[in-house]
Every structure is written in C-alpha cells, then in structure tokens.
Image (cartoon, rainbow, N blue to C red):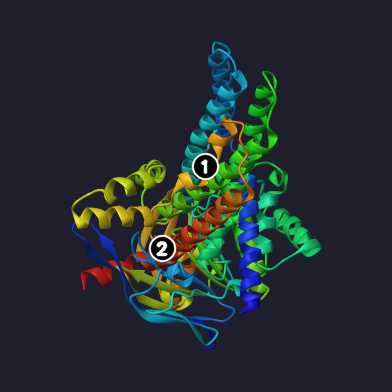
Amino acid sequence: MNGILTIEGLSLSVPTGHVIQGRRLVLDDVCFSVARGSATAYLGPNGAGKTSTFRILCGLSRADAGSVRFAGEVVCDARVRGGLPAHRFGFMPEQPYFYRNLTPRELLTGLGRLSGMSGRQLGAAIEDWAGRLDFEAVLGQPLRACSKGQVQRVGLAQALLHEPEFVLLDEPLSGLDPLGRERVRQVLHEVHAGGATLLFSSHILSDAEAMCDAVVVLDAGRVVHQGEIAGMLGKSERWAIVVEGDAGGLPAVQRVELGHGRYRLLVDGEAERDRLLNALRTSFGCRLLSVEQDRQTLEQAFISLLQDGRAS
Amino acid sequence: MMGALVTGLQGAIRIGRMSFLDALRNRLLYGVLVFVVLLLLAGLAVATVTMGRTELLLLDLGLGAISIIANLMAIVTAVQSLQTEHAERTLYVLLTRLPSRGWYILGKFLGLGAVLGGLVVLMVLILALMVGMFGQVHWLSVAQALLATLFEIWIVLAFSLIFANASSLFLAILLSFCMDVAGRFTTTIHQFSAQAESGLLRWLGDAVYYLLPNLEAVNLRNGAGDIASFGAERVWSVVLYGSIEVALLLTVSSWIFSRRNLS
C-alpha cells in the first residue's frame, strides 16, 4: 500500500486533577496507515482519542511515544512536535469559530495568504469555494451574523482553499442541515476525486459509509479495527424481499409487518431467495415489491465491533 | 533560514492584521472610548472649580486617566483575545499555518498593540483639544507623554500575553493587573529592600527590581502636567527601555507558548 500517512506506536497521556496531578492515557500504541488518494473514516466513541490524534498530527500536542510519517518523512515523534507540513495539508477543527468581527472573505483572505496564496488566485479561490459550499450570500457580512452551519462551511473552505494533498477534518458534517450535509458530502467527493487524501472523524456513520473507502476504529485510545469499509461490513448472505398481500404461507426466516398490508421477508442464501420468489409466482394473493441484499450498515458493524471488543 | 524568517514575519503580520481588524470592530473598545470621554468631561468639571492653570490640572488628570484605562484595556483585550481564540479553536487553524508559535505571539502583539495604540492616540488628541479650550497646549510635552504611554501599554500588553498563555481567564487578568500595579512601584520596592537588614530581603528586592517591568521608567506624563518637555536623552531612554522590555517579554511569552500542549 502506498501510505501517505503512517502512524506508529503513538501514545499520549494528559494530566488529570488540579492539585495532585495524575495522568490518563488517551492514546495507547496507536498504529495505522492512510493510503494516498483514499478517503478514510477515523471512527470511535466519545473520548476514544480521535481529536487527540488530530492535535498531534497538527503539531498542537506532543506525543509521549511513537512517530508520524508523512510521505515517508518523520514529521513528529516524542521529541519533535512538528506536525504535518503546513502547505501540504488542510485542517478543519471540530465546530470551529473564527474572528467574529471579520467577514468570511477577510478571514479566508488572511488564512489563504498564511498558506502562501496571493492576489487574483486567492480571490478566485474564495469565490469558487463560497459558491461550491453555498455561503456566497454571507461572504461580506461579519461571522458573528452567520449561522452555525455557515461558519462550519467557512471552516471547511479554509481547509480546502489552498488545494492541499492531505485533508484532515474533525467532524466536518456536524451542525449542518440535511441540505448542507448533502452539499458538503458532494464537495468532499469532488475533492477526493481530484486526488486529495481525506482523513476525517465523524459520528454520523451513514455519511462516513457513503464517502469513505477505508476505516480506522479507535476505542479507549487503541485501534480496534482498520481496513476497507467493505471488509468491515462483511458479505451478507441474507436477502430482504418486500411483498404486499397475504404473506402467511410464504417460506421465510423472519417476517416483519411494515403496515398497509406490506411485509418484509428475510431469507438466508440465494437458494432460499429463489425458492421464495418461485413461491410468490404461484401465489395469487401476494405481489412482489422489491428484492435486495440485507446488508449490514456501518453503524451496525461499528456497534457490534465495539460491543464484541468490550465483551471479550 | 532567511526564508523561514521571512515566512514567519509575513505570517505574524497577517495574524496581526486579522487581530487588528477584529479588535477594531469590537464594540467594547468604543464603549471604553465613550467612558474615557465622559471621564475627561468630569475632569473638566473638576478643573473649572480650581483657581488658575486649569489646563494643566486637566492635562494631568486626563493623562493619568488615559494611562489607567489603556492599561486595563490592554490586559483585558490580550487575555480575552488569546483565550477566546484557544476556546473557539481559531488558534488551531492559525498555528498549523505558521513555522513556529512565536510568530503567532508576535502577530497578536502587533495587531492588538496597533489598535490600543490608535485608541490612546485618539484619547490624547481629544484631551489636548479639551485642554486647548482653557489655555495653550504644549504639544512637545504632550507628544512625549503620549509616546511614553504607548510604550507603557505595549509593555502591559506583552506581559498580559504571557499570563494569557499560561493560566485561566480570571487568573490571567488578576496576575496581569497585579503585575501592572507592582510595575509602578519597582523602584520604591527596591529602595525599601535596600534598607533592610536581612540579606534575603535585599536579594528579594533586587530580584523584584530586575525581574518586573519598571513602568515608571516609561512615564513622562508628569512633565506634560508641568509644561516641561524632556531632553532627547530621556526620551530615547524610554524608547530603548520600552523596546527591550517588550522584546524580552515577547520572547518569554513565545517560549512558554511553544512548550504548551494545546488541548
């Protein structure tokens, strides 16, 4: 695998208490790799250590042990709190808020210049991202007058403005309405299709499932799973068939009433599915509505993974 | 090496510009400005009941009030600005774009220093116009007092940035305020401790004298009240002391900030 980011044995502890200082382990020997050009979801329950990992990657915290390699070069370890190279990555923190009295245009101009952009190129990029992320109407009004969702989109724009090859996003879809989420998903798809590598954390697993091809799951500071999303979901042998009418006599493992005379019938394996479909053809009181593989969602797989891990 | 220095300096100027614009549009500062004008009008009322040299009393009272209020503004603005940027994670997107954290501290100092400096200039101009209604304004001594007050608030701003980095909002304001008060008495503390019999007390007095910024060393306000303008040597000593003190405090602030793990 051509890994753009490789994390090896990363550990971090934080001080606890006020007078007598103890330490709590937040990251415990975290190891994973992100393939160049991939979209990787970094998942975990609250307090698992996702944001702490991002802080180390950004050079905001120093790890107690371990190292981070970016494009083959060590960028931070227990001695150096370097962070990823500034012009090659974009970062959006969770629920960012920026200078309240600045307009999105002024903020993006300032941040764009800090990223080495200038002049006409910067102005055009700001207009472009404002259009793509649907906040062009508020480009000239102070950020304190913008909604939470608009600020969130400005936050995403500042991370993508300088077209970085690696994008680090902490909960990019939180606080957005369904339309806003769809817009951001679309933009992230385009950025990914353009060749950028994405690593992002999210608690909205349906979005992660729709956007990512790889997943790293963290629980209590340890990596409990990493690999392709398809591998985590597994290959389901179960089929779901929705029918309308009298489904009483049809062979099925499970029968769920959906209301209005509709039933969802579950069968295991293709042979059973074909047997049920044959039975439907000869059944006069029942009409076939849909046939689909009953696939496990990422959310279900995530919950099972964590529950199984904690039980064992 | 040179490239990193230029990049860092450009970054500091850009952060300074954003901080400047943000602070300039902060309504709180305008509230303070209105308060100062009211305070000066009150001073005017006091000055009118005095016998003779009304303009000198007004100038003395006004410069003192401007100094106190500008110092408080410097403390609150520095601490609030830094802590808000940390709490709202603005700091994160700025730091990931800079070669080192010291440039951020320099940028904050430049931005906030420019806003506070501008407000002090404005307040002194308003005061000078009011003084002009009662008598002649001695512009040279007023300008010298203004220059010294600017260095004073920049020193206060620089040490407030240290505390804003290293402690909570309330504690940072409290410590900065204590430092501000102590900074006006360093010479007195030194003179007292020099008379002590205990060697430890004398040593402590010396330590306080050399460690704390001496705000009286950048005070030329009394001269303005007495219509006396200072010689170039005294003015240059204010500029030199103020510049060195600010540079030292910013270096300490950058060193502390660079060692912190941000959470």
Quadrant holding the C terminus of chain B:
bottom left
- Single out the mark in the foreground, 2 or 1: 1
SS at badge 1: loop
As drawn, which residue projects farthest toward the right? A120
Quadrant holding the N terminus of chain B:
bottom right
Residue named by callout 1: B219
Query: Dot 2, how many residues are within 10 Å of its Cα: few (below 14), some (14-19), or many (20+)?
Result: some
Task: Tell me what residue is drawn at x 60 percent, y 58 percent.
Answer: A156
Query: Dot 1, how many residues are within 10 Å of its Cα: few (below 14), some (14-19), or many (20+)?
Result: many
Task: Tell me what residue is drawn at x 28 percent, y 51 percent.
Answer: B194
Task: Tell me what residue is drawn at x 64 percent, y 59 percent.
Answer: B13
Percent position of residue B200, x then y? 21, 57
Marks counted in the figure total 2
Amino acid found under the numbered disc labelled 2: Ile
Report in which chain the residue with disc 2 lies. B
Residue A49 sits in quarter? bottom left
Closer to the camera in the image, B188 or B170: B188
Residue named by callout 2: B256
Whole-Å distance between the Cαs marked 2 and 1? 29 Å
- From this view, report whether residue B72 is shown above or below residue B15: above
As drawn, which residue projects farthest toward the top? B49
Left or right, A231 with respect to A96, comes to: left
SS at badge 2: helix
Left or right, B54 with respect to B178, comes to: right
- From this view, report whether residue A192 is shown above or below residue A243: below
Report in which chain the residue with disc 1 lies. B
Earlier in the chain: of badge 2 and badge 1, it is: 1
Closer to the camera in the image, A77 or B225: B225
- From this view, report whether residue A135 is shown above or below residue A303: above
Closer to the camera in the image, B254 or A131: B254
